[in-house]
Image (cartoon, coloured by chain):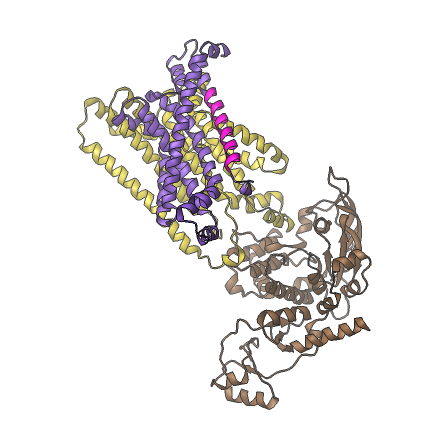
Amino acid sequence: MSEATSAPPAGTVGSGDRHISGVAIRLDGVTKRYPGQDHPAVDDVTLEIAAGETVMFVGPSGCGKTTLLKMLNRLIEPSSGRIHLGDEDVTDQDADQLRRRIGYVIQAGGLFPHMTVATNIGMVPRMLKWDKQRIAERVDELLDLVGLDPAVYRDRYPRELSGGQQQRVGVARALAADPPVLLMDEPFGAVDPITRQRLQDELLRIQEELGKTIVFVTHDFDEAVKLGDKIVVFDVGARVVQYDTPERILAEPAEDYVADFVGAGATLKQLTLTRVGDVDLMQVTTATVGSDSAQVVAAAQAAGDGFVVVLDRRGRPISWPTVAELARTTTVPDTVDERLPVVGLRSTLNDALDTMLAASQGGVVVTSRRGGLAGVMAVETVMAAIQRTRTEVAG
Amino acid sequence: MWEYVTERADLVAFQAFQHVSLVVQCVLLGSLIGVAVAVLVYRSPKATALANGASAVGLTIPAFALLGVLLTPFGFGITPAVIAVTFYAALPVLRNAVVGLAGVDRSLVESARGIGMSRMRTLLRVELPLAWPVVLAGVRVSTQMVMGIAAIAAYVLGPGLGGFIFSGLSRLGGANAVNSTLTGTIAIVLLALVLDLLLVLAGRLTTSRGIRV
Amino acid sequence: MTAATELHPEDAPQEVPPEETARQADPSAAGDGGWRALLLQPTLLALGVAAFLVWRVTAALSETERRQLGWTVLGNSIREHLALTAAAAVIVLLIAVPLGIALTRRPLRRLSPLVIGIANTGQAAPAIGLFVLLAMWLGFGFGTTVVALVVYAALPVLRNTMVGLQGVDARLVEAGRGMGMSALSVLLRVEIPLAVPVLLAGVRTALVLLVGTATLATFIDGGGLGVLINTGITLSLDSLLISGAVLVALLALAVDWLGRVVEHVARPRGL
């Protein structure tokens, strides 16, 4: 990311406190016609995507959203129309050169199974003729960024990774040459819901750090609401039905079509609009692994807490024993509770509720950007939020 | 050449019949052997590996060499031809049957046993029908391969169209040498294609509609 | 001859293992098993060669037999046989692999069913017919034999090259293009490496086929170990016949084993 700050690409816009390394994308009358088909797959789309924004493409399957995405990096050549990246018209640029400047993430990462994680990530830098040392450093930096320990994962083959880990490597590979634009084609479609939620949180964190321009195709409206700064709702032929913030699309669907697509239960959809970081979190007594149990118990009792969050030596929560459980030990144990429900600050209340239900717990531990403890959220907080929106809708 | 064939229509028809008859009977016999062995071995990984190894090694033995070796105990004639052709016919069927049977979803077998079907019944009603398309693919491979091997068998005085090829070779330069060889070769190609077509048809008719692709 | 139109089930592109279960796979364990299987074949082979040598040294042979089975004559026959096989194999590789690659590229892809159809039909032709017809056309001898062998063994390599390339997950190709690799670069760095296992299996099939089919060279004066078998049959000398047959079988097994070793070594890691 050092490259990004030292040489800001064309079209970089500063917006307040957020660091932006992306560029704007402008589509001008982009059309894709396939021979032998009556209607164009993508019909005259004009769209502007601001630098550093995450824009979600949603719509029914076959509506042309993926076709449109693939025209951005010209995996599909547009029949007519212009595509601009920043101030540059890239419609007639050499496609291979163009793609090296655009990150591309697909389902299951699309990792090359015969290459190690490091080789996969280093692909684009190698094509750009970086020197070996720089590539190796970049690989480690990226693995770190996506939350994988470089020493452990650098030399593994994709099949030795779980689905979620493969997806992380896929994102790292797309970011390798620090492209201003990231295209993501249903990247989290093939992983289980809990892993998907983690990956989404991770993407939000990375995006907060990097400020890329991200175009993200999904069929999951909740995902769109959670990740998107803006959402584009498409109908057949990639007709743009509504292009707005998630809040406004939920509050004021432009057409019945959007309302249908957003679906019933819009009240509960508000849960996807509220981030865990937006509500008040409970602060609880914490204890570091190996410290004296009796002291911790005393502190918890003094604070009136029924349980304690145990942190490992890097400050990450690993378990939350009750005071009674802790009282039976002499030092705070380092056992990792695999079922500990954890969400990030950027997770939605919906995610938090899901996580609680999946773990059969009445609360979740909330972590901050780098995995440290931010607080604890109780199920009552979610309930209160539901209650509030119901009252709002009724009133 | 057309003249050559029409003049000897009876002989060509007879040899063609002999060729196909040899191939069909040997493929039937070979398939039965292949499937039977597969049924015996497919549950045990060790036996399966052994069978696959034997089948792979068997297929590396050149047909001409095997035919030659068989001459010593059995002499010239139909016996070495039948043994060699059956041997080669059995191998691809064996391998495909093992693959097919091993590929049957274990949970299906369990559910068959669960509703009270006997081992035998499970094999006949569930496993073999599900493995059938793969077995049949093996039979097709066998048939194609064995059509050519049967032609070499003519050299050890086995029956069939190979006779035309070898008589062409022995009367080299003679008036009808080329015609004779061409007749044998083309007839074998045509018959092989017809047999393959019949097997495809048989596959359509004998494969359960539920698993047809 | 033998493995002619074989449909190798093991050559089919392997399914990608379900992601979540994939991680426990321990590649070294599988590798050891592979090597153990690879060691069995040469052991059998060595036993076969030893048995032949013992027989050759101890057997009471007639004058003709001794002349035909003399070490120099045997050596020459084996060398001829290998020369036929090697020459044909090299030409097959030079023709079939590039053709298979070309037929899976977009401009020519539409032709591939046609070519495969023609090749399959050709495969139904009996090798012996092909040999004799080609000899009548091109004359007898080594060259014609090589031509006949090439015609006969090209299909497995062609087909496996195509199957291997077609078996490469289209999403990987798209991922490669999507990150800015040129079509050639995707072919060389992604498609061909991933197709290598299937491609090599085709080459091995072709090699075994060549060793076996080269015995027919004797009928058109191409030389090789078939001469021994044929002489044995015509002169009713079982010792010649069986020597030839055993040696060809051992040669085929040896070539098959070499092929397996190469496949094992060349298989890209991570698969």
Residue A125 visible here: no
Is the N terminus of chain C in the top left, top right, bottom left or bottom right quadrant? top left
For the magenta stretch, what is the residue range?
A: B186-206
Q: Which chain is purple?
A: B
Q: State the residue lying farthest toward the front.
A: B116
Residue A31 x, y percent position in the rendering: 77, 45
| Residue at horizontal 40 percent and vertical 35 percent from the top | B31
Q: Closest to the observer: C41 or C190?
A: C41
Q: Any magenta on residue A90? A: no
Residue A309 x, y percent position in the rendering: 57, 80
Say if B202 sits above or below A194 in the image.
above
| Figure label count | 0
Residue C93 x, y percent position in the rendering: 48, 34
Indicate left or right for A295 with C42 as reference.
right
Q: Which chain is yellow?
A: C
Say if A156 sits above or below B88 in the image.
below
| Residue at horizontal 31 percent and vertical 28 percent from the top | C76
Please identify the quarter of the rendering in which residue C135 is found. Answer: top left
Q: Main secondary structure of the magenta part?
A: helix
| Residue at horizontal 52 percent and vertical 45 percent from the top | C193
Residue A391 x, y percent position in the rendering: 78, 74
Indicate left or right for A17 with C59 as reference.
right
Q: Closest to the observer: A135 or A121?
A: A121
Q: Colour of chain A?
A: brown
Say if C155 sits above or below C143 in the image.
below
Residue A213 visible here: yes
